[in-house]
Amino acid sequence: MAARYKRILLKLSGEVLAGDAKFGIDGECIKALAAEVAEVAALGVQLGLVIGGGNFFRGVAAAARQMDRVSADSMGMLATVINCIAMQDALEKQGVPTRVMTAIHMNQVAEPYIRRRAIRHLDKGRVVLFGGGTSNPFFSTDSAGSLRALEIGAEVLAKATGVDGVYDKDPRKHADAAKYDRVSYDEVLARNLAVMDASAVAMCRDNQLPIVVFNLTTRGNIMRMSMGETVGTIIGNAL
């Protein structure tokens, strides 16, 4: 059994680590997620992960509560490092060698992000967890995911969410929402489909990096995506 992609950047929201609690890290949830990642890594797929910090702190929401945006985003970036360390622990308990690399230097707990070193880790079969966002405020972890995917030469940016793809409108609010199997970058941007930040989508468009949006809550979808099966929605060039 051979995977379709040799190198994947997997973008996870922090909320998925919280499970039903909606806050913090659920031990069984992160264990199950690590087991799925381990299965894909066992095929020889090189995996980089970017994890959001929404299970601890959301910068935009805090800014709306009158907190300074730069301070709020800094707190959010630190939350992503907590999640990376937790995922590293869960993966290593599955026997998967990992490295945590951060855009914000904190040498006692993680390596500083250096592109060539990250690629070397991937080539050696290690899963690399990218924490600290881009180290800059006003940029989301979607943008960090697009940036790291391009820097490491990933073949696809896989965004794992709580819905099964991209819809023409919010399926949680509209019963008649229609799901796309494939949609162009330009349509996502023009229609403001909000599956990812516009800057992240534009970065992928400008560098021809395909995006797969799929439902993480369905067991086995990470494997199906890596095998090239039709799961979720592909964002790419127009047909």
Image (cartoon, rainbow, N blue to C red):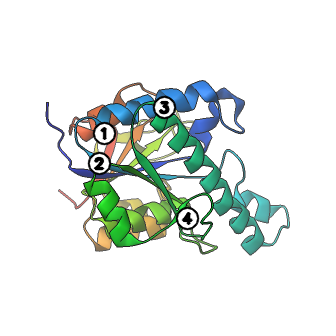
Tell me the residue that label 4 is attached to.
Answer: 133
Amino acid type at image mark 2: Gly
- Which one is closest to the eye, mark 3 or mark 4? 3
Q: Residue at the location (42% across, 72% down)?
A: 114
User: Could you tell me if the residues under marks 1 and 3 are in contact, i.e. CB atoms within 8 Å?
Assistant: no
Tell me the residue that label 2 is attached to.
Answer: 125
- Which one is closest to the eye, mark 1 or mark 4? 1
- Is residue 20 rendered to the left or right of residue 88? right
User: Could you tell me if the residues under marks 4 and 2 are in contact, i.e. CB atoms within 8 Å?
Assistant: no
Label 4: how many Cα within 10 Å (few below 14, some 14–19, many 20+): many
Tell me the residue that label 1 is attached to.
Answer: 41
Amino acid type at image mark 4: Gly
Label 2: how many Cα within 10 Å (few below 14, some 14–19, many 20+): some
Label 1: how many Cα within 10 Å (few below 14, some 14–19, many 20+): some
Tell me the residue that label 3 is attached to.
Answer: 93
Q: CA distance from mark 3 to mark 4?
A: 25 Å
Mark 1 residue element: helix
In the rendered image, residue 66, in percent from the top left (x then y), is placed at 85, 67
User: Could you tell me if the residues under marks 2 and 1 are in contact, i.e. CB atoms within 8 Å?
Assistant: yes
Label 3: how many Cα within 10 Å (few below 14, some 14–19, many 20+): few
- Is residue 130 rendered to the left or right of residue 29? left
